[in-house]
Amino acid sequence: QKEVEQNSGPLSVPEGAIASLNCTYSDRVSQSFFWYRQYSGKSPELIMSIYSNGDKEDGRFTAQLNKASQYVSLLIRDSQPSDSATYLCAVTKGGRGGSNYKLTFGKGTLLTVNP
Amino acid sequence: SAVISQKPSRDICQRGTSLTIQCQVDSQVTMMFWYRQQPGQSLTLIATANQGSEATYESGFVIDKFPISRPNLTFSTLTVSNMSPEDSSIYLCSTSDRGGANVLTFGAGSRLTVL
């Protein structure tokens, strides 16, 4: 079983719709979870981090974490063409302020938002 | 977030040669990391660059192939030695963000093509 799994997509949504991106992880001791956005030919940039079960909202983005199910998701409301990118889920064993900085990344989901 | 400069941004190399990638950060950082992103794949951690001591390599990566230097808290180099076409990849330098442990900032990456 891969450590971090994501649907590779592509996921295609119309402009203004909600895009839902999913990620599962295998290591139960994982404590920190991140979503990175990577535009084609560019380096990843952090868009959300989540450490506790539940929802975390930041603008149009909502991260959801369920540690019991080992599942983390990212919702993008009112999707815009500029949101078209690959979204990478990343997981680390270290908690916030913890000593384990090693991130394990999923392969990413390619999102296309159609005008 | 720290600003990370990498060079070269891209290069085309001949089989059997070696190339050194430089990573410069605009502030002192404790943790520096080198990742590889092969075509169509996600990011894989190569090693943690430790200031004043030998780098810590992940499984599957060895010092002879990927020697790393970290002479101070703002600079690191990664050398890809005796390159083969399988080494064609994007190599990314990253640091942990001052805003919180485990939050990574990435350089723009160095795209290497080995012929």
Image (spheres, helix red, strand yellow):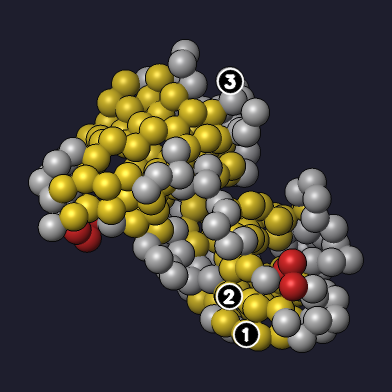
The quarter of the picture where the C terminus of chain A appears is bottom left
What label sits on residue B111 in the rendered view?
2
Residue at 44% x, 70% y is A41
Q: With B106 as the anchor, is B71 left or right in this view? A: right
Specify whether residue A12 is in view: yes
Residue B74 locus on image (x, y percent): 59, 70
Q: Amino acid at mark 2?
A: Arg
> Which of label 1 and label 3 is nearer to you?
1
What's under tag 3, amino acid-wise? Arg
**Quarter residue A66 falls in:** top left
Q: Nearer the viewer, residue A52 or A17?
A: A17
Work out how far the residue at label 2 is from the one at label 3, CA to CA, in angstroms.
34 Å
Q: Secondary structure at mark 2?
A: strand
Q: Whole-percent x and y of residue A70?
A: 49, 21
| Residue at image location 64% in from the left, 52% down from the top | B44
Under tag 1, what secondary structure? strand
Residue B17 locus on image (x, y percent): 82, 84
Residue at image position (34%, 57%) is A85
Q: Are marks 2 and 1 in contact (CB under 8 Å)?
A: yes
Most distant residue in the right direction: B64
Q: Is residue B22 above or below residue A108?
A: below
In the rendered image of this protein, does residue A44 appear above or below residue A12?
below
Residue type, mark 1 in image? Asp
Give the mark, 2 or 1, whose residue is nearer the N terminus.
Answer: 1
Q: Chain of mark 3?
A: A
Is circle 1 on the same chain as circle 3?
no
